[in-house]
Image: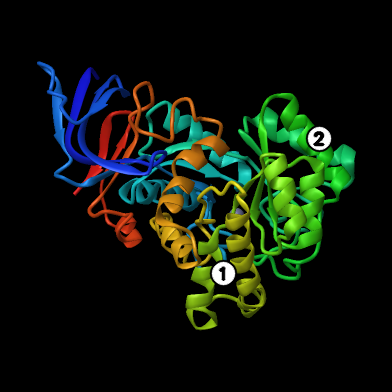
Amino acid sequence: MGKVFFTNGNIIDVVNEKIFKGSILTEDGVICEVGADLKAPEGAEVVDFGGNFVSPGLFNCHTHILMSGEPDGGGNIGDVATIVNALENCRKHIETGVTFIRDVGGAKYYDIELRDAQKKGKIFAPEMQVSGKNICMTGGHGWSMGREADGPDDARKASREQLRAGADWVKLMATGGVMTNGVEPGSPQLTEEEMRAAIEEAHKVGKRTCTHAQGNTGIKNALRAGIDSIEHGFYLDDWCYDWMKEHDVFFVPTLSAMYWIKVNGVEAGIPEWAVRKVNGAFEAHKKSFYEAYKAGVKIALGTDAGTPFNFHDRTAYEMVLMVEDGMEPWDALKTGTVNAADLCQVSATHGTIEPGKKANFTVYGGDPVADIKNVCDCRMTVIGGKVMFSK
Ligand SMILES: [Zn+2]
């Protein structure tokens, strides 16, 4: 694709917490130069940022691309409808600035096929890492779309199955959750021994592991078993913060998942049992988020997109919620860029705007540091030097 010269931007340096006027030269989708006084080389295609604010490409590190935000969690729709919706969800991500998603659980390995199609340039979608089927205990959270496993040997086999299918991550269900009727967020599910066996298999081949973990006992089981990221984390405590810092475990709080259920409620068609569970844990979750942040736990942005009213065009709103709950705007911007790249182990190529990195940009209409809500005003999305969306 040759050279593309992106000019007239306010470039956001998330690491050094600076915004500077400048241009970015890319070649074949990779950043060559970034600076204030660059000139367009002869023959380069020129793209004008229009004075807007240019962030490193935004990540969403907790999506369910096969789910679309229905009030009741979606239920049984046909295979074709599922894929049609998934492609629509991918488009929504790009049109709201998301350049990279980490999908953490879907039925039938469709997520893996979508990732491969994206890599081949066959679909309009952000870059993806995927998990295949979530691994849960029989009848546990997410069982209807997951792989039920009981006992360490079976959990090990289940993990190997996901890896064989091509998963980038192994997703384990350490506790109950909100959107499965009859299970409680606070109760532990897969045991420490089961998770350890599954995690060993992923780590053996250099893959990472994440866990749906809401209650304190289940969170600790997952941490002791060697998990790499805690999703949701309603009931964290000092022991968890210390462990997570010492072992470099990420926290992906998904504040959005709770928020959209709470603000829509039973009147919007969300089951009463789900609303009850959210209300029961809402304040504890905010407290855990703030304490983890203050303690210095690494936090990455994920929304749990696909859960009720948590649509795939609402990724950036997670940063608004984080700031409302006490995070500094610069730190919120880091969760969706440099931290997310670190979690996904793509820091060598993603997460900042620097020479040598992939030309993924998310362009906002206003300064997000002055007002974090500007992240909800996406003007342009660039993936690999290609303008995927602009308005
Ligand atoms: Zn989820």
Q: What residue sits 54% from the left and 62% below the top?
A: 255
Q: Which quadrant: the N terminus? A: top left
Q: Nearer the viewer, residue 256 or 336?
A: 336
Image vertical order of residue 324 relative to residue 254, above or below: below
Residue 69 position in % (x across, y down): 49, 62
The amino acid on which the numbered mark 1 sits, given as a three-letter code, is: Asp
Occupied quadrant, residue 224: top right
Q: Amino acid at mark 2?
A: Lys
Q: Indicate yes or no: mark 2 CB to ligand 1 under 8 Å.
A: no
Q: Residues within 10 Å of mark 1 (few under 14, many from 20)?
A: some
Q: Secondary structure at mark 2?
A: helix
Of the numbered discs in the image, which one, if any, rests on residue 72?
1
Left or right side of 389 for 144: right
Residue drawn at the location 73% of the way across and 33% of the way down: 161
Percent across and percent down for residue 306 are 51, 57
Which quarter is ligand 1 in? bottom right
Report x, y in % for residue 17: 37, 44
Residue 157, labelled with which disc?
A: 2
* Label 2 crowd bin: few (<14), some (14–19), many (20+), radius 10 Å: some
Which of the two labelled residues, at mark 2 and mark 1, occupies the earlier sequence position? 1
Instruction: Answer yes or no: is residue 85 visible.
Output: no
- Please state the total of marks drawn on the protein image: 2
Q: How is the image coloured?
A: rainbow
Circle 1: element type:
loop
